[in-house]
Image (cartoon, rainbow, N blue to C red):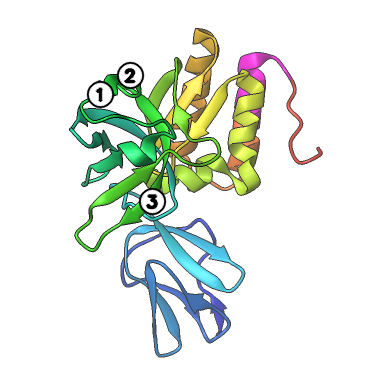
Amino acid sequence: MTGLIINEKDIVVPGEVLAKGMDYLPAHGTYRKDDEIIASRLGLVTVDKRLIKIIPLSGRYLPKQEDTIIGEIIDITINGWRLNINSAYTAMLSMKDATQDFIRKGADLTRWFDIGDYVVTSIRNVTSQNLVDLTMRGPGLRKLRGGRITKVNCNKVPRIIGKGGSMVGMVKKATNCNIIVGQNGFVWVQGNPQDEVLAIETIKMIESNSHVSGLTEDIKTFLEKKTGNKLDIGGK
């Protein structure tokens, strides 16, 4: 017998055989042994064309260059700002990468960002010593004003966003909220207070049920019941 042994979105454990034969290729969280692809970690199976990979069910964010994330200012140094990025490592935003403004030496850096501020930023570089450098130079990168921040498992972010942004787009439409999902698991929601609460409740529901098949329809039904409005997804 060749082909997939498991179904997409199954939860698997290390050592479990996922596929036999050469029709599929191992990707993140899997490896090949002879003609079998085997899980190397606990997680959720996803199949992308011929690639089989596992999305971990837990774990902190591992910074990757060019990821767009949300960070919290936790310290101000003479050279810039230190941020919590929901990782084992903090990150640095230097003055030259924070703004196009000229910042003179000794300037009050709280004029730009203060402790407790949240920003949408991008990872410019990750060194071999796990030093993380950020930049605010790019489209959509900015300081966040108002709204609420909630935290989700960073490994569930792809499910929360959905293919082509479909899942988060549905939540935005139903709740009339602005939503930004950082790849590090910080999520910003902005709307009126009641809508923000519903948006966060929905996001947490997606996070908790990310392994469930038919989740999009379940979320659609949930939002329609909560709002009393019909939602159109995928042209349906």
Say what amino acid the circle numbered 2 marks: Arg
Q: Which residues are magenta?
A: 220-229
> Which residue is the site of mark 1?
107
Q: Quadrant of the N terminus?
A: bottom right
Q: Quadrant of the C terminus?
A: top right
Residue at the extreme bottom of the image, as rendered: 34
Secondary structure mostly taken by the magenta-highlighted segment of the chain: helix
Seen from the viewer's position, the closer of residues 49 and 178 is 178
In the structure shown, which secondary structural element does the residue marked by tag 1 occupy?
A: loop
Count the labels in the image: 3
Query: Marks 2 and 3, how far apart in space?
Result: 23 Å
- Residue 199 percent across, percent down from the top left: 52, 22
For mark 3, does the 10 Å Cα neighbourhood hold few (<14), some (14 to 19), or many (20 or more) residues?
some
Q: Is residue 47 rendered to the left or right of residue 42? A: right
- Residue 3 percent across, percent down from the top left: 57, 79
Q: Are marks 1 and 2 in contact (CB under 8 Å)?
A: yes
At horizontal 74% and vertical 36% (from top left) the residue drawn is 233
> Which residue is the site of mark 2?
111
Residue at the extreme top of the image, as rendered: 193
In the structure shown, which secondary structural element does the residue marked by tag 3 occupy?
A: strand
Above or below, 199 relative to 77: above
Foreground label between 3 and 1: 1
Say what amino acid the circle numbered 1 marks: Ala
The numbered mark, 3 or 1, whose residue comes first in the sequence reads 1
Any part of residue 59 in sight: no
Quadrant in the rendering for residue 107: top left
In the structure shown, which secondary structural element does the residue marked by tag 2 occupy?
A: helix
